[in-house]
Image: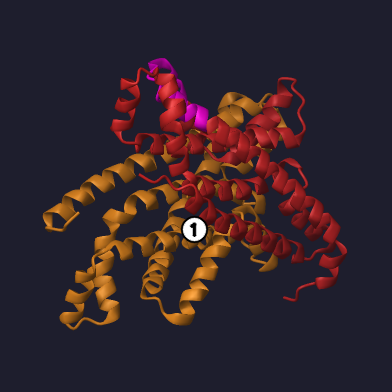
Amino acid sequence: MEITFLDILNTLRKGAFETIKILPLSMLFSLIAGTILGAIQSKKIPVVKYLINAYIIIMRGIPPLLLMMLFFFALNINVPFIAAVIVLSIYHTGYITEIVRGGIEAISKGQFEAAESLGLSNFKTMSKVIIPQIWYQVIPALGGQYIILVKDTVLISVIGVREILWSGRQLMQLTYKPFQIFFLIGVFFYVICFALQQITIWAEKSLKQKSVDSGRRT
Amino acid sequence: MNFNYRLISELLPMFFEALITTLKISALSAVFAICLGSIAASAMNLGNRPLNYILQAYISIFRNSPLLVQLFFFFYGLTFIGIRMSSFMTGVMAITLNEGAFFAEIIRGSINGIPKNDWEAAESLGLSRFLILRKVIFPQAFRNSIPALTGQISLVIKDTSLLSMIMLVELTRVGSMIYNKYFDFAGFIFAAVLYIVIFIVINNLSFVLEKKYRVRR
């Protein structure tokens, strides 16, 4: 049976949906975990500080591919999809923690003191006063990290998630048309990354408007 | 979960060889990529418009698509059109092209960060645009970008793990080979430890370099 260009597109489309399903989940989880860890890290609690630091160094040191295999085989998670989301989240949480911590440290001391003088608890200071202000600072770095996350999703084909590169490699074995297939996959990622870039720029602009309106020194 | 020390100590020579391979690929592709990035970034400042478009296209294409896809593209594509290359060479080439785009972006950023005065001062000495870039701007820009460059180099080392997908025996591949043979993930853990050690060494080296080569104004 001859495999036409249309068939290739159709197969890749199925894979692309799988990729797109994984993306928002791991983005969301890594953002939540990263924000929490970053907030804890900015408090500089004696022992916890070293633990989180070790976590960050480990995540920055291990290649995501190795981490993926380690998790999938060592922890024996039977559903590849869940393993993929967990690994992508854990890996990028390390980076986002650093980004958020940087953002929190860029907030002026006066904000912390003002919140304290109002009698807010530590948790409330963070969640109501500090965290809402960091986004303008954080957005460019966060956008860059998300682009890396998008590109890291191809690695989950290793543990058998049927995402776009996995479909591409299956097609490779059937048709042997490397240029068409990998070019199409490249275009798919290019579009997503380009869109993310534009969203980042747009978000930065609109947040800048906001932070100027609230009279914050930039 | 118990860690199999015996297995690791028996297979230590294999790990050593793989570590050397990983370091060799990282060093080669990092050097090539920094050269490529420097040339591309400098060329973007020569003021040649068609060249600029080409370089911008190169940077945005290679930055915005996954390295693994590029790797497969070259690995399968080159054999398809009849060029036979070892997976080592293909890997070095793919990583060089991919990371070259990142290095170009870093160095371009720091070239833009050099104050306009330096351009004007050099111009008033009658230097050509090419000479200004080579003798005045680039040396400063390169020194300024050392922290970002070393950060990117640690990413190059992580990228080499992808070469296990094209059958090159390096650290990650050794880990999965051990898993396939003995059904033991100790190999992964040991490989991970080695990667982390490399990362920590590079990280500390970057602090030393940064201090040594800081531009004083």
Q: How many marks?
A: 1
Residue that appears at 48% across and 34% down: B104
Image: magenta residue range: B38-57
Q: Nearer the viewer, residue B32 or B88?
A: B32
Of the chain colours in the picture, the one used for chain B is red
Q: Quadrant of residue B73?
A: top right
**Residue plotted at (75% across, 66% down):** B186
Q: Position of residue B197 (x, y in %)?
A: 65, 61
When the figure is inspected, residue A202 is found, relative to residue A178, above or below; the finding is: below
- Residue at point 27%, 47% (across, down): A204
* Lateral position of residue B173 relative to residue A186, left or right: right
Question: Chain A appears in which tint?
Answer: orange
- Residue A101 is at least partly visible in this image: yes
**From where the camera sits, is residue A10 visible?**
no
Please tell me how crowded label 1 is: few (under 14), some (14-19), or many (20+) other residues with Cα within 10 Å: many
Q: Is residue A12 magenta?
A: no
Is residue A112 placed above or below A56 in the rendered structure?
Answer: below
The chain letter for the residue carrying disc 1 is A
The residue at the point 39 percent across, 19 percent down is B127
Q: Is residue B43 magenta?
A: yes
Residue at the far front: name it. Answer: B125
Q: Nearer the viewer, residue A114 or A158?
A: A114
* Image location of residue A183, percent across then percent down: 56, 29
Instruction: Give the image location of residue A201, x and y in percent.
Output: 30, 42
Could you say which is closer to the camera, residue A17 or residue B183?
B183
B116 vs A168, left or right, is left
Majority secondary structure of the magenta segment?
A: helix
Q: Amino acid at mark 1?
A: His
